[in-house]
Image (spheres, rainbow, N blue to C red):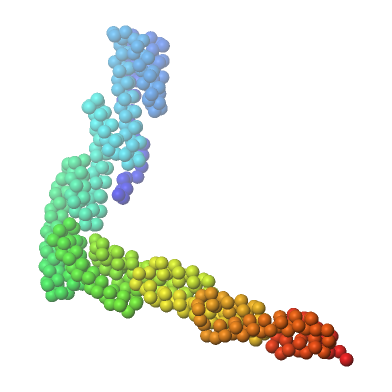
Amino acid sequence: MTDRSPQRAPRIAVLTLVPLLGSLLLGACAATEGSETSFSAAQRLCREGQYERAAAASVALLEGLSEQSELRPQIEALQAEISVASGLEAARELSLVNRDVEALQIVRELTEAHPTTPVIGEWDARIRAKLSVRWFEIAREAVATEDFDLARIAYAKSVEYQPEASTIAAELLSSLDRIEEYRADVAEQLYYRGVRHFTDLEIAEAVNRFGAVRKYAPGNEAAERRETEAKRVMAQARVDAANALVAEDLFAAAAKEYARAAELDPTSEEIATNLAALRIEAEVQETMTRADGMILRREFDAAAKALGEALERTTLQRDLVEADLERLGEARAADRYSRALDLEHDFQFERALESYGEILETREFYRDVRARVDSIEGYVADAERLYAEAAAAEDGAAKLALYRQIEVFWPDYRDIQKRIAALAKP
């Protein structure tokens, strides 16, 4: 709510009876000198705004006086003045911070207690006028935002605080009636246009028309019901389009269609369930795309982890994920095979055997791996046998001949190059 309260008003004088009390004091011939001094002190405290001390002083004065004292009426008048001044000061402070309803309550209590004090009536009129203006501004803002129910309430409150403004409020309420009649007519026209569009299967236009009715007639149940029906028809069209995309494995696009359908028909549990499932399938599809890149970069372990998680999540793409896992296995085996060939060609037979063995751990057959393993194992066995025979031979020429046989198929075997060089010296 916009605060349109007036700015702080200048401090007004409320102790208008104090000079009168001073003149009354001059005629109090029966008063004692001490009493007169105490009365002056109470009067000064009241004038300075020290109302609690002034009230306490006046009570003390009365307690010390007899019932027949000529000073008693003056003190009682001073007490009334203290009551009015302190009450109006409290009301003024509340009004300055826009707590005018509380301020008005204080003023009304003062009016009941002191009905003949003009300044109280002035403050009552001032605060009521301020409240009336504030509610009038609220009403104007409500009209601007087309909240006509609030506008009517606010105009009524404005008149309640300032009945003399009832003529203006009545005119404004009459204009509200004309506005609402116009809006009701527009809402009716929009509604039946929406009905015609719906009948002609122009669903989007129907939704727009029924939705526009809300602007002119909030809470129109017939328009809301019709709009819901039309949106459900549109939602079903989105679902049909999404299902066609699913058939083409376009899960991300299908999820978007289902998201639009969910916006149109937020109460459908089936749409919400399918939307959640398709979002998972779209994420799985994205994971498979990322796994393709990992395989190309030979990040086989990372690809295997990603595809394993995808397989656990998917419902519609299990065959595709499993095919990617098979392709991953093929790529890993091909990489190991290539590595093993390099090792074999470099005569690193033991390491080549390890690499070929890793391939056979995951598949029974792969290319010519088994033949190569048999061949390398034969080389290893022959090398060990020939090396042992050379060590047992006593003739240097026989040793050299045996080492030369190993050199043919495994030139880097153990230390045969050093032995050959030593035996081949003239």
User: Would residue 328 appear left or right of 129 to someone viewing this image?
Assistant: right
Image quadrant containing the C terminus: bottom right
Q: Which of the 4 quarters of the picture holds residue 320?
A: bottom left
Q: Residue furthest right?
A: 426
Of residues 371 and 31, the one nearer the viewer is: 371
x and y, in percent, of residue 269 in the image? 26, 62
Of residues 145 and 10, the one nearer the viewer is: 145
Q: Which of the 4 quarters of the picture holds residue 188?
A: bottom left
Is residue 353 among what the camera can see? yes
Of residues 400 and 102, the one nearer the viewer is: 400
Residue at screen point 29% across, 39% down? 100
Q: Which of the 4 quarters of the picture holds residue 147?
A: bottom left
Residue at screen point 45% across, 71% down? 307
x and y, in percent, of residue 137 in the image? 25, 50
Residue at screen point 79% across, 81% down? 392
User: Would residue 140 appear left or right of 381 to someone viewing this image?
Assistant: left
x and y, in percent, of residue 142 in the image? 23, 53
297 in relation to 156, above or below: below
Circle count = 0
x and y, in percent, of residue 90 in the image? 34, 32
Residue at screen point 20% across, 44% down? 157
Is residue 16 among what the camera can see? no
252 in relation to 183, above or below: below
Of residues 91 and 33, the one nearer the viewer is: 91
